[in-house]
Image (cartoon, grey):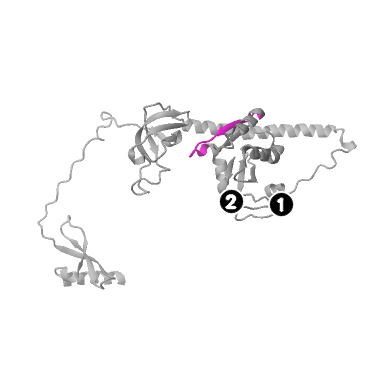
Amino acid sequence: MDWVTGLPPGGDRSYNAFLVIFDRFSKTLIFLPCHKDDTAMDTALLIWNRVISGTGIFTNIISDRDPKFTSALWTNIHQLFGTKLSFSTAYHPQTDCLAERMIQTLEDMKSIYASTNQTTAILEKRWNPRLPQDSLRKELIEIHPTAASFKGMLDKARKNSVRFMEDPFAYAKEKWDKSHATPDFKMGDLVLVSTTNFNNIKGCRNHKYSFAGPFVIKSLHGENAVEVKLSEELSNKHPTFPVSLIKPYKSSDAQKFPLRNKVPQSIPPIESSGIKKITKVLKEKKMRTNKVREYLVRYSDPTCEDECLAEKDIPEATKLLRRLRHTRNNNITK
């Protein structure tokens, strides 16, 4: 579960926030209107009246470290219920990606789907369920044998559906854990830090390095975060990073990779006579400022780069320009 704040006030109670709850088991999505300044007690009552009455007690709650979710009231309530509280860290989509993705969807939906005087069932399921008004009639107290066998069939189908949903989750988790094993970091190790969330690094954004470092690990914060000693260039960054954004630094071994430290031989300079001779006119263009025509020329000396010159600065300009126009006319004719 997560919060969506910063919304304009709406409704008879001037709601300005949403509590987004995503059921990982049934893939059910619940949006609860609330207020940004609600306390932990208000949040607990909201979930008790609007969610638990329909779904039952939670077995596990994944959320961020909002003060409402880390308060003593919230922790003690779920300790009595037997609910496990799992808190996610920043930039860790493996934990709360479902809620974060639905928040992005909500931002698109709130400007498209807007209505009033709708029941919860209409908004979530698009239909109103029928009420069991005849459940207390005398003729329904005794259970027919066929109904009892049908109930057993439904119970078996429910257990199979639970197993069919839990088995893929367990298989996907096993495959993920095998390919994403977290290294065993220790204090003093050299690591590289991902620059994915670094927006003010010098240089071109598309050409910046994927990792920065190496940096020394100062301390460990559990199994999911480490604190490193950053350089002066990155001193304005927070030194604590999740383990998903760092990787061990492996230095090059001179014995195993002798060619990596080998200095490349410099290319001998090309001897030039010092006379720049123009061999070809490549292109003609007219300057917008002074209305003067300039020509892109190429020299016979390979060390000289192409440059633009005026017609008066080109030796044998008449001959070279005649050749340029002749080539251009032939291309147009073809």
Q: What numbered label is drawn on residue 290?
A: none
Which region of the structure is painted magenta?
A: 81-94
Compared to residue 170, the image places residue 38 above or below, namely below
Left or right: residue 30 compared with residue 207 = right
Residue 248 position in % (x across, y down): 38, 31
Q: Residue at x 57, y 31 (%)?
A: 170
Q: Which residue is mark 1?
A: 118
* SS for callout 2: loop
Q: How many marks?
A: 2
Residue 116 position in % (x across, y down): 69, 54
Sequence order check: which comes first, mark 2 or mark 1?
A: 2
Q: Amino acid at mark 1?
A: Gln
Compared to residue 214, the image places residue 303 above or below, namely below
Which quarter shows the N terminus? Answer: top right
Compared to residue 33, the image places residue 311 above or below, namely below
Left or right: residue 137 compared with residue 285 = right
Quarter location, residue 297: bottom left
Residue 225 position in % (x across, y down): 46, 32
Left or right: residue 194 compared with residue 154 = left
Residue 191 within the magenta-colored segment of the rendering: no
- The answer to whether mark 2 and mark 1 are in CB contact below 8 A is no
Residue 312 position in % (x across, y down): 16, 71
Q: Which residue is mark 2?
A: 7
Quarter location, residue 240: top left
* SS for callout 1: loop
- Front-lying residue, 98 or 284: 98
Compared to residue 174, the image places residue 316 above or below, namely below
Which quarter shows the C terminus? Answer: bottom left
- Closest to the camera, between mark 2 and mark 1, is 2
Q: How packed is label 2: few (under 14 Cα within 10 Å), some, or many (20 or more)?
A: few
Q: How packed is label 1: few (under 14 Cα within 10 Å), some, or many (20 or more)?
A: few
